[in-house]
Image: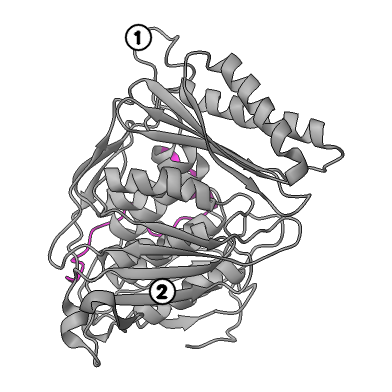
Amino acid sequence: MAGGIAIDHSPLPANSQIRSWTMASPAPIHLLGTTLEGGGQLLRIALSLSSLTHLPLRITNIRGGRPSGGGLKTQHLTCVNWLGAASNASLEGTEKKSRTLLFEPSTETSNQKNWWKTKSIAGGRNIRECIINIGSPGSIGLVLQAVLPFILFSAPASDEDSTAAAMDSSIPINLTIKGGTNVNFSPSYDYISQVLLPTLERIGIPPIPISLSHRGWSHGRTTIGSITFTIAPLLPKTHLPSFSLTQRGEIQSITVTFLVPPEARKQIHKEISNVLSHKFPSTPITFLTDEDSRDKKRYYLLLVAHTSNNHTLGRDWLYDKKITDIPSTITRLVNTVVDNLISELKHGGCVDEYMQDQLVIYQALAKGTSVVDAGRRGNSEEQEGYPAPREASLHTQTARWVANQVLGVTFDEEGACEGVGFVVGERFSGGESTNTELDAEGLENGIAGLRI
């Protein structure tokens, strides 16, 4: 693992190129880190796809769209180093705040390193274990976003201590990630367990049981938490079939999760009941989690809508405004999350804004055309005819752009994508991207088709 390289801030070449795919050490795919969302989303998806396909990457101006100055933070380095080790990659630029990264996985699948330990448990069964320690309250959910596709789609390498056990893909992997469970602008433990994982199961990913050891917070007194995911990788020589998330159905119930200081629990319960009964008068409401946040600065609320066709859509907020008094804080928290959920549901989609971008990589890897209906523009319940599809968020546009650059896939106006049919454990034979390198002027044209 190399480090200490000079940071390259040079612009990309002005000419757009079509990348030709060869089996012998292709040139690194050059991704400009300021594209679209310009943050960590681009990095995480690019690393995940590179690790799977063994295609090298060069990412410049990493997180250049961030006002804080960009570059790699602890959470991002965790993803880089773990995926780099798992794919036996050659790395350059793995320092904190580095703005340029070269990531070159080994082109030989036989060189893939074991990233777990196998042990026997009760009943004579074996289980594989892996621990990823972020070392800070960095988001566990965002690290999961980067490493989960690799774990699911990578056939296990041999294990010198227990070859038979390692080659038996029915053995689950207990992945423990230590970091933040409740972090600003990141999927919380509660959103992951109630929205993300049920949706992944719906698209064909094997069920992933989840266990919270303890919470980690970025608010108040910072603490490091721990979550364990029990993951069953896809079997070797198989692929993820195409999937369709359409026809949302009617809203049948809403579940509530809140974590607040003890002195605020009765008041927030009352406020939520009053607001939801007014906004959703005929919808059953269930309080799923009512938990002490253990700090006067920690206020978190998640609302999840459940539909008649078994879709789940969520909106949440880890309160990040100044707390002057409990009543006004609770009023603002509750009304904001309820209004956001109402706005989300009016679009009529099967997934919420924050779920849509997390499905892009699975659409791209699946075999066949997968469709994710994120709703229509405006209020789908009030508009006549068939309104245009809802515009994708910047995170979704970014994920689609990266998938195009690495895999060559495209998305149509309805959010449909014909995936590459990635076969577990086999070498990726390649695709062709529409634009590998774009200058500032060409970038707008290159991504215009992704804004759907």
The mark found on residue 83 in the picture is 2
Q: Farthest residue toward the top? A: 384
Labels 1 and 2 touching (C-beta < 8 A): no
Residue 273 place in picture, x, y as percent:
61, 24
Nearer to me, 241 or 194: 194
Q: CA distance from mark 1 to mark 2?
A: 47 Å
Label 1 amino acid?
Gly
Instruction: Tell me what residue is drawn at x 48 percent, y 78 percent.
Output: 81
Instruction: Residue 381: name its quadrant.
Output: top left
Q: Dot 1 lies on which element? A: loop
Relative height, residue 288 to residue 42 (above, below): above
Any part of residue 445 in sight? no
Instruction: Tell me what residue is drawn at x 29 percent, y 47 percent.
Output: 201
Residue 36 place in picture, x, y as percent:
53, 48
Q: Magenta stretch?
A: 425-448
Q: Farthest residue toward the left? A: 237
Any part of residue 251 in sight? yes
Nearer to me, 446 or 15: 446
> In this rendering, would 188 be left or right of 253?
right
Label 2 amino acid?
Leu
Q: Does the magenta stretch mainly form a helix, a strand or a loop?
A: loop
Relative height, residue 123 to residue 70 (above, below): below
Q: Residues within 10 Å of mark 1 (few under 14, many from 20)?
A: few
Instruction: Residue 228: name its quadrant.
Output: bottom left
Comparing marks 1 and 2, which lies closer to the viewer? 2
Q: Farthest residue toward the bottom? A: 160
Nearer to me, 48 or 304: 304
Residue behind mark 1: 385
> In this rendering, would 61 be left or right of 355?
right
Instruction: Tell me what residue is drawn at x 75 percent, y 61 percent.
Output: 221
